[in-house]
């Protein structure tokens, strides 16, 4: 099953859940927590547990009319005749649908979710191993700080300040990468809003003082799996990436909008690097495997060498 991850807005949207039992209840609880306007068609089952004002419980059998004006729907039943009925109507009405535990006939699947306010992480195995997805969710839940969503909200509100103080898009991009680096992230999570504001102002001032930088990554393999975490981070934030032949696997992990320069014998690497450093760029040079090329002769404070 080939899927693309898409976050669907369900806030105040009409969503239908058909079925009863634990599977249907889980979908109702999830959708209710996302502030959807949930219609729960229980197929005649009586529901005694209390639910919020955004959950309408319909203790009736299935009828086509319940599919009117619905954004999407979840079906939790193994009644094959009913499934066929629902499929025909849903396809005719262009309503997207999910059959719980039946990814092969579903138009979309619901992943395991980790949520911290507006930060949402979705984990999916394309319906092949839901328990594995839940176990991964558990591990992420353990490592992700509870207040990281609040920090995302704070930095969103700080964006106009950053844009006013920094005019160059590449400096703004690098600033936010520095803000969310492990070092600064851990600091910010433990500060008051006033302290966060001052910390970010100080970082912007430091950005203005920063010069261009060249980072050499000495490859011993052309496999992306062999890159260190530090090397991965550099190719994700680089303004310019110089790369050689047979490095496409590594380049698949590089920053999408970075300027990419293919290394050739005719290319004057040092002159090219000097030009970009003068513009304040972060240049990453993927030094080819077994390359006889010597290190680039830039000022020491502008040069960093990263191994594998």
Image: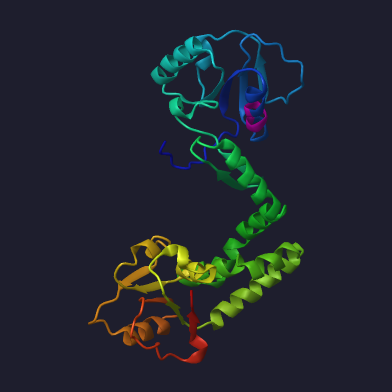
Residue at 69% from the left image edge and 67% from the top image edge: 197
Instruction: Report whether 179 appears left or right of 81.
Output: right
Is the residue 278 above or below the residue 223 in the image?
below
Q: Can you tell which quarter of the image residue 23 is in?
A: top right
Instruction: Report whether 206 appears left or right of 211.
Output: right
Percent of width and height locating residue 169: 46, 68
Percent of width and height locating residue 279: 41, 81
Percent of width and height locating residue 138: 67, 46
Percent of width and height locating residue 223: 40, 65
Answer yes or no: is residue 272 visible. yes
Q: Is residue 130 magenta?
A: no
Answer yes or no: is residue 168 visible. no
For this rendering, which residue is in front, 133 or 33? 133
Residue at 54% from the left image edge and 27% from the top image edge: 101
The image quadrant where one finds the N terminus is top left
Residue at 60% from the left image edge and 64% from the top image edge: 180
| The magenta segment | 27-31
Question: What type of secondary structure mainly makes up the magenta span?
Answer: helix
Which colouring convention does the figure follow? rainbow
- Residue sitting at the far left: 266
Instruction: Report whether 248 appears left or right of 165.
Output: left
Instruction: Report whether 74 appears left or right of 30.
Output: left
């Amino acid at each position: 099953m080939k899927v693309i991850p898409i976050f669907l807005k369900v806030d105040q949207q009409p969503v239908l859940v058909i079925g009863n039992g634990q599977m249907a209840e889980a979908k109702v609880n999830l959708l209710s927590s996302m502030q959807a306007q949930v219609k729960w068609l229980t197929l005649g089952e009586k529901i005694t547990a209390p639910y919020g004002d955004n959950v309408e419980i319909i203790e009736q059998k299935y009828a086509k009319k319940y599919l009117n004006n619905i954004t999407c729907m979840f079906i939790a039943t193994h009644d094959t005749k009913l499934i066929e009925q629902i499929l025909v109507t849903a396809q005719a009405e262009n309503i997207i649908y999910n059959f719980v535990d039946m990814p092969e006939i579903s138009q979309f699947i619901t992943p395991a979710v980790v949520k911290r306010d507006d930060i949402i992480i979705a984990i999916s195995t394309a319906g092949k191993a839901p328990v594995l997805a839940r176990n991964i969710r558990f591990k992420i839940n353990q490592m992700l700080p509870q207040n990281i969503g609040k920090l995302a909200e704070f930095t969103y509100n700080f964006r106009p300040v950053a844009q006013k103080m920094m005019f160059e898009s590449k400096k703004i991009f690098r600033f936010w990468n520095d803000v969310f680096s492990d070092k600064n992230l851990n600091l910010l999570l433990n500060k008051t809003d006033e302290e966060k504001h001052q910390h970010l102002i100080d970082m912007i001032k430091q950005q203005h003082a920063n010069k261009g930088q060249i980072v050499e990554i000495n490859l011993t393999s052309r496999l992306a799996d062999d890159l260190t975490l530090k090397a991965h981070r550099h190719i994700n934030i680089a303004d310019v990436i110089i790369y050689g032949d047979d490095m496409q696997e590594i380049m698949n992990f590089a920053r999408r909008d970075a300027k990419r320069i293919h290394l050739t014998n005719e290319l004057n690497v040092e002159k090219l690097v000097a030009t970009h450093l003068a513009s304040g760029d972060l240049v990453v040079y993927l030094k080819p495997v077994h390359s006889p090329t010597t290190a680039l002769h830039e000022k020491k404070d502008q040069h960093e060498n990263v191994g594998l």
